[in-house]
Image (cartoon, rainbow, N blue to C red):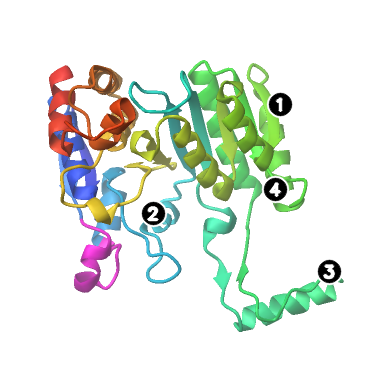
Amino acid sequence: MAHDVVLIPGDGIGPEITEAMRRVVEATGVSITWHVEQAGAGVMDEYGTPLPQRVLDAVSKVGVAIKGPITTPIGTGFRSVNVALRHAFNLYACVRPCLSLPGDGSRYHDVDLVIFRENTEDLYAGIEFDPGAPEVAALAGLVDQAGLRPFRADSAISIKPISEAGSRAIAEAAFEYAERCGRRKVTAVHKANIMKATDGLFLRTVREVASEHPSIAFEDKIVDAACMGLVQDPSNFDVLVLPNLYGDIVSDLCAGLVGGLGMAPGANIGTSCAIFEATHGSAPDIAGQDIANPTAEILSAAMMLEHLGEAEAAEQIRAAVRATLAEGAVVTADVRRALTGSTEGAAGTQAYADAVIAHL
């Protein structure tokens, strides 16, 4: 069966790692028709936006996409393309497995965690107001009328919306995954002791969903305690479900338990669309040098194939990646450094992809 997939190469190292990924996917024998669409800083001059309408139209039509990293300016410039895609297609679930791999350089072994991050709400909804904006003055007035502690007039404000519907959707996704994949426990991560309205709603909703899935153990942890616990002993955790901001932070922490973001795949799942991506950034400082590690992008493609019903090919890719890393002969500089303390003899991006293909 042939599958249509939108491929968004991205910028920075994106084109290099997506090319490596595409070659690995094609080597499995699965028939993919790639619809290549460009987004990111490189199309700003031509389209006046980093996310042209043609990209949105293609993803809407096909329903499945895989993308390379896209640069997001810090503190200024255009809005995150990733956030815009999540909102455009209601990609409410960010799913990030964190699994130990040979040669990942981590001090931990046998880590096997899955993060379910709510992907559309919370502070990442992007509802912000600069100091001096009329909305800030209006909010200050409401706070004052309520008899609450006032905030300074020169404050910038960010709004944190968390809904029962959004919380239920991500909680159900986490528990259904746990049941389907034979997982033992779901942990809700929150700060409901301080943010009693927003995080309190999230926690109450997850507890309700937990009661509907009695075969799965459930616990909740305050986010700072959860971070400490993950560093002390990640084996105490299994599936974690979190609001958007904590999910972003904790998923990177968990990636650090398995060698870093270069090893961490990801998926953004909605009711009618799914977009898969490596979870790291665009690394413009090493772009075009054929030294980037494409493992996360290749493993994201395995998640995509699973989504498309090609479970056997997905497992073949995962096995080939593990075999390549375990062998250690043809690995990128970051992995070589983890294995030997030196980058001498490291392979390039495409040579590493060749080694994975050979192990298929």
Q: Disc 3 and disc 1: Cα gap in Å? A: 35 Å
Pick whichever of labels 2 and 1 is earlier in the sequence: 2
The reply to whether residue 31 is in sight is: no
Q: Is residue 150 left or right of residue 97?
A: right
Q: Disc 4 and disc 2: Cα gap in Å? A: 24 Å
Front position among marks 3 and 1: 3
Q: Nearer the viewer, residue 109 or 66?
A: 109
Q: Of helix, strand and loop, which one carries label 2?
A: helix
Q: Which residue is mark 3?
A: 148
Q: Which residue is mark 2?
A: 82
Q: Position of residue 16 (x, y in %)?
A: 18, 45
Q: Amino acid at mark 4?
A: Asp
The quadrant of the picture occupied by the C terminus is top left
Front position among marks 2 and 1: 2
Q: Which mark is residue 211?
A: 1
Q: Position of residue 119 (x, y in %)?
A: 50, 47
